[in-house]
Amino acid sequence: MPNRSSISVTGWMLFCAATFGQDWAAQAQVARPPAQTESGADAERTATGDKSVGQLVQETIDLLDKAADLRRDQAELNSLQAVFDQASQNVQTIQEREPLNPWLLYLRGRAYSLTGKPADAAEELRQFVQTREGRNEWRAYRSLGDLFSDNFPRLARSHYQKALALKAGVPEILMGLSKCYLKFGEMDEAIRFAREAIDADRRTKPEYVSHLALLLQDAEQWDEALREAESAVQLARKRVEEKPGLRGPVRELDVHYGLLLDILQSRISRADTGDVQDYIRLAEYGRAQAEIIRTLALHDILLLIERRMDAVEGNRSPQLLEPYGVLLAEVGRTDDAIAAFDELLQSDPGNMTASRWLKQLRPAAPD
């Protein structure tokens, strides 16, 4: 079973080798490759499904977006590997067909950003927005805004504003502007853009709602800040339920609970006489966060055991399979847990723990 702890170094190396294989300046000196043989062209068409370069570019953009989501969720490595393999194949095909295609700049910039190379990402994206294709591409300006938002908020704001002029109502752009205005200390504008981002997103992203709650806390608008923080927790909990077995959503839920408790404690500390309901909620939310912290600890322990299981694939200890299966079940990785308990029963048919868990995990058979 593959290691699910993080993005595969091998996967990223394969992807980056295809994406960053040649310097753009060097590419400018390279002529188009010689015409393919008929058999070679047939093989390429088969691999890419007769897709045009434009279709491959859009598909690769979607794959990079998916890779970012999978990494944030700390999803299984095999899911990430499949995304990397397809993206790598697409980029290779684009480079072979059109080595000077300006969209390669954008794809490289996005990939550099995902691999933690912001300076290289910014350079590629800056070159891209100077091209005919890039100057009207809102996603490139948004990506530049994201790269500069932490350390250069004024530069980031400029890029976000260009992106917004090209594509109005994009939640990510609006949220980026809110964060820039927060850096400037312009709280009213920060709150305004945060509200617009949440409305444009239709209240699906808990991180946007938590950002607004944090702004309202800074503005000492306690009642609304508390309502928004509670809403963020509800949205985050829904994400955990929709993505069972992943550590990333659980970690996000822990963060949102932390903000909720901080806002509640701040309101209590500033009140002359605390509302008893606030103390009741404090106890309720504190217990809920404790359960989430426990789940995160189980994920961490599972990671260590899973590394051991991967190292001895084909010769796994029945004694270790039992706690391994229990941990898988407790963090919500039901299919993996069933597989582990089935494997345990093959070597220990009378294992009561495995039998009991399988009855809980498998849907009841029809009469």
Image: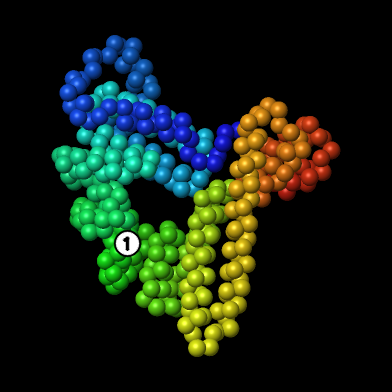
Q: Nearer the viewer, residue 39 or 81?
A: 81
Question: In the picture, which quadrant includes the C terminus?
Answer: top right
Q: Secondary structure at mark 1?
A: helix
Q: Residue at x 57, y 74 (%)?
A: 282
Q: Position of residue 151 (x, y in %)?
A: 29, 55
Look at the image and name its color scheme: rainbow
* Kind of residue at badge 1: Lys
Question: Residue, x 18% and y 46% (percent of image)?
Answer: 136
Q: Is residue 241 above or below residue 85?
A: below
Q: What residue is shown at x 30% (from left), y 11% (from top)?
A: 38
- Provide the residue designation for mark 1: 179
Q: Name the foreground residue: 278 vs 332.
A: 278
Q: Is residue 296 left or right of residue 355?
A: left
Furthest residue in direction bottom, as rendered = 272
Total marks drawn?
Answer: 1
Which residue occupies the foreground of this view, 37 or 302? Answer: 302
Residue at the spot 39% in from the left edge and 64% down from the top edge = 211
Q: For label 1, count other residues whose C-alpha is less than 10 Å away and answer few (under 14), some (14-19) or many (20+).
A: many
Q: Position of residue 343 (x, y in %)?
A: 72, 34
Horizontal and vertical percent for residue 7?
48, 39
Q: Quadrant of the N terminus?
A: top right
Q: Is residue 322 visible?
A: yes
Compared to residue 196, the image places residue 340 above or below, namely above
Vertically, is 174 above or below 365? below
Q: Is any part of residue 332 visible from this angle?
A: no
Q: Can you name the residue that lies furthest to the right here? A: 350
Q: Is residue 138 left or right of residue 330?
A: left
Q: Position of residue 106 (x, y in %)?
A: 27, 39
